[in-house]
Amino acid sequence: GQSLEQPSEVTAVEGAIVQINCTYQTSGFYGLSWYQQHDGGAPTFLSYNALDGLEETGRFSSFLSRSDSYGYLLLQELQMKDSASYFCALSSNTGKLIFGQGTTLQVKP
Amino acid sequence: DGGITQSPKYLFRKEGQNVTLSCEQNLNHDAMYWYRQDPGQGLRLIYYSQIVNDFQKGDIAEGYSVSREKKESFPLTVTSAQKNPTAFYLCASSPGTGETQYFGPGTRLLVL
């Protein structure tokens, strides 16, 4: 089957760097996506990795290692508005997107 | 503006009643999806459609039904067979299956 694991909660202070890890199990891997969801809102797309390495988009970066079935989202220069839930999501040959349970990030002053 | 719209924002269902949630997109995307999200949980796939007039069950399809008569529209009906329908329902679309998905604002369904 397919599954993803990510920590349930992470806490960091404003201005710091935080890393949210995601490990997965699947056959027919296509890619790993990251979504952000603020409380009460809809998920918004952050980044996608299909190949090994680091993808950078402003303060956010995402990394993938297919040999380790592992990826992470790196958030730099944390701001209060970054407090949200972050989901990793797996694309595979099923055509569906499978979401992790989400990591709640709390940014403190 | 291009995007995905869902209506209503809040919906109340009475015992034994069927209710339909609307999802419309003008992004010209082929694929559309319905997810259910319970408090503090991830997203679970209810149904998805890769092309007009075709759809597949997701992981939790029981008690739900869909139709895809037009490319732009993918309504979800929560039937009386769904015994625990209270949740946040999210519709999404993507250019093709397995590609990046874009979400609508969601509908909160509450049972009276």
Image (cartoon, grey):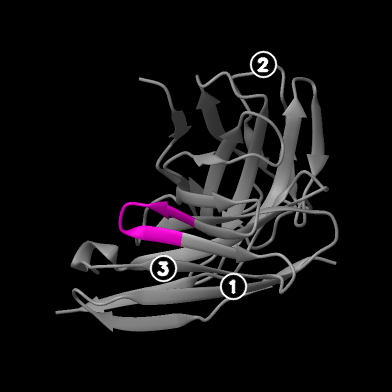
User: Which residue does the image show at 55% across and 50% down from the upper left?
Assistant: A48
Residue at 30 percent across and 77 percent down: it is A106
User: Which marked residue is nearer to the observer: mark 2 or mark 1?
Assistant: 1
**Residue bearing mark 1:** A22
Circle 2 is placed at which residue position?
B70
**Is residue B83 at least partly visible in the picture?**
yes
Give the residues in magenta.
Answer: A55-61
Evaluate whether residue B111 shows in this view. no
Q: Residue B107: where, in percent of width, then height?
A: 46, 45
Q: How would you rate the neighbour count of disc 1 (Cα within 10 Å): few for under 14, some for 14-19, many for 20 or more?
A: many
Residue at the image point whose x is 72% and y is 39% from the top: B48
Task: Check disc 2 and give the amino acid type.
Answer: Lys
Q: Is residue B19 magenta?
A: no
| Of the image marks 1 and 3, the number of the one nearer the N terminus | 1
Identify which residue, A77 or A53, lies in the foreground: A53
Judging by the rendered image, the residue that carries numbered circle 3 is: A74
**Same subunit under labels 2 and 1?**
no
* Circle 3 crowding by C-alpha within 10 Å: few under 14, some 14–19, many from 20: some
- Chain letter of disc 1? A
The residue at the point 36 percent across, 76 percent down is A18
**Quadrant of the rendering where the N terminus of chain A is positioned:** bottom right
Instruction: Give the label on residue B32, or none.
Output: none
Q: Whole-percent x and y of residue B64? A: 72, 46
Answer with the quarter of the image where residue A23 lies: bottom right
Tell whether A77 sits left or right of B108.
Answer: left
Measured as percent of width and height from the top left, residue A32 is found at 63, 56
